[in-house]
Amino acid sequence: MANLLKKYVVYTIKLVNLANSNDDILTRRRYSDFESLRDVLTKVFPLIIIPPIPPKNYFDFSVLNGLVGNNNEAASSSAASSSSIGANGNNRQTYSYINSTHLNKNKLIEHRKRLLTNFLNNCLDIKQVRNLEFFAKFLDPNANWSDEITLIQSQLPKSIYLLNPENGLKTDPIYVNLPNPSNKNTISFFKDNKKKLTKKTNKLLNNGTTNGHKSDTPNSENQYIANTSELDDINKRIMANFIGLSNDYTKLGSTFNSFSLILSETTTSDAKKINDNELNVIFDKIGQVFDRSYIAINSLIGELETKFSEPLGEVVQYTSILHYVAKYQAKKVKQKTMLDDEVKEKKKSLEELLKIEEESSRIENAINSQGRPKNNKYNLQNPQQQQLQQPSSQPPVPQQSQSQTVAPSSSSSSSSSKFKFPSFKKITQYVSEIIDQNPEQTRKQKIVHLQEKIKVLEKCQGIMLADLSFITDEVNKNIQAFQTRQLKMIYGILLQYNRFLIGWAKKNIDIWEEVREEITSM
């Protein structure tokens, strides 16, 4: 850690034994370990709402430090809060406490510690996660997490759509045969969703309001997801205003203190000096009011960041996770449609090959039944077609006359041409490798392969039906259950917010009342 280029933060996890307080376990993990743990949990359980973790990247702290001031009392009451998030590593969204630009890196690390603690405690509340063997090894100080996570990732497919939605570690090998809905061209997505994207863009440009008709009816699962984006945006603006007000209080306090010093140094007559002294005291008291108000509002900012903005940021992350789960369900429905289309296509190809095979067998049977005729010609027509066909009245053209008319042209061309073609042995050797030497056998192999593939895909159809039924029930259950929890979280957060504002307002009233009494008593 002495080398700045290799400097990193290690977090100590303390497991407390409730039966014996002296039997504690301490495990040290880096942020990347938490990140890999959550990543593999979202793959193993794509339908479970895995708790979020704080983001890895923050802003440039050297630029952000000292924008509000260096008051020790105010700084000690402030806490960490500045970052951006992603639901599962893809779409990133800003935290509501990104306005806390005056916080230093150490306090942001404290913020991360609090959220990582929440992550682990919330994971322990999930039965499926708590019973996982590799989750226990994450908390084991003697386990090598790098080796463990590498082993787990090797057991999982690259795409979450090719695993068992109930438990990815129990994925049947037949899931490999499923089509991957995430491999489709992105352009087709924009083409198919042109109207939806246009409405969404217009809504964003109009600050969430549209002049036209209302958007399409939301999905059944989306009606249970509370929209926290507006609350998050309002909080950002309020926090920015509070920080700006804190800066204004600093400037006002300095201005009134300067006036007080100027009046105290000014020499005038005795009568006027008494008035100047009174003004000096008044300016000094008002300057103290703004200094104390600066401390009070910084204390409010610190409380809002740690006890309002941080929980609100987690709620925003949970909302993104819920949308991710709903998106997973939509992708699985699309996968079922792709599977049905593939089965139809394979059956159509098999039907065409069977027709060709049937026609080939009929021709072969006709040849074998007629024997070898003297004129080396086979009659492959059906008996009914032979009776309907009328004999030709014109005599056949002699074979010899035709050969006599063609022979001179070929002999003349060969005699007049000076160019000689090279040997075709090598060319025919390569062509014979490309051209199917036994098309009948190849066709039969294709038929067998298609029949086996169709059996596998039909088995996949049965699995997909069971998976979709499970996914629908699980998503509805999880989202509806989380809705109650989410509303309770938001309700508690707003109550805390009101308490902080009321407390801050009372402090300001007390400060001004105290100064008014002092000035009145003069």
Image: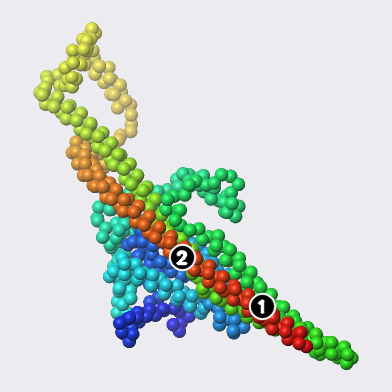
In the shown orientation, is residue 372 left or right of residue 285? left
The answer to whether residue 412 is visible is yes
**Secondary structure of residue under mark 2:** helix
Could you tell me which quadrant the C terminus lies in? bottom right
Q: Position of residue 15 (x, y in %)?
A: 35, 79
- Please give the name of the residue rendered at 19% of the width and 36% of the height, measured from the top-left corner: 440
- Please give the name of the residue rendered at 51% of the width and 68% of the height, measured from the top-left corner: 493
- Mark 1 crowd level (few <14, some 14–19, many ≥20, 10 Å Cα): few
Q: Amino acid at mark 1?
A: Ile
Q: Quadrant of residue 255?
A: bottom right
Q: Amino acid at mark 2?
A: Lys
Please name whichever residue, 90 or 255, is drawn nearer the observer in this view of the structure: 255
Residue 381 higher or lower than 187, as above or below: above
The residue identified by callout 2 is 488
In this picture the colour scheme is rainbow
Q: Position of residue 111 (x, y in %)?
A: 49, 75
Q: Quadrant of residue 294?
A: bottom right
Earlier sequence position, callout 2 versus callout 1: 2
Q: Residue furthest bottom?
A: 270
Please name whichever residue, 105 or 52, is drawn nearer the observer in this view of the structure: 52
**Secondary structure of residue under mark 1:** helix
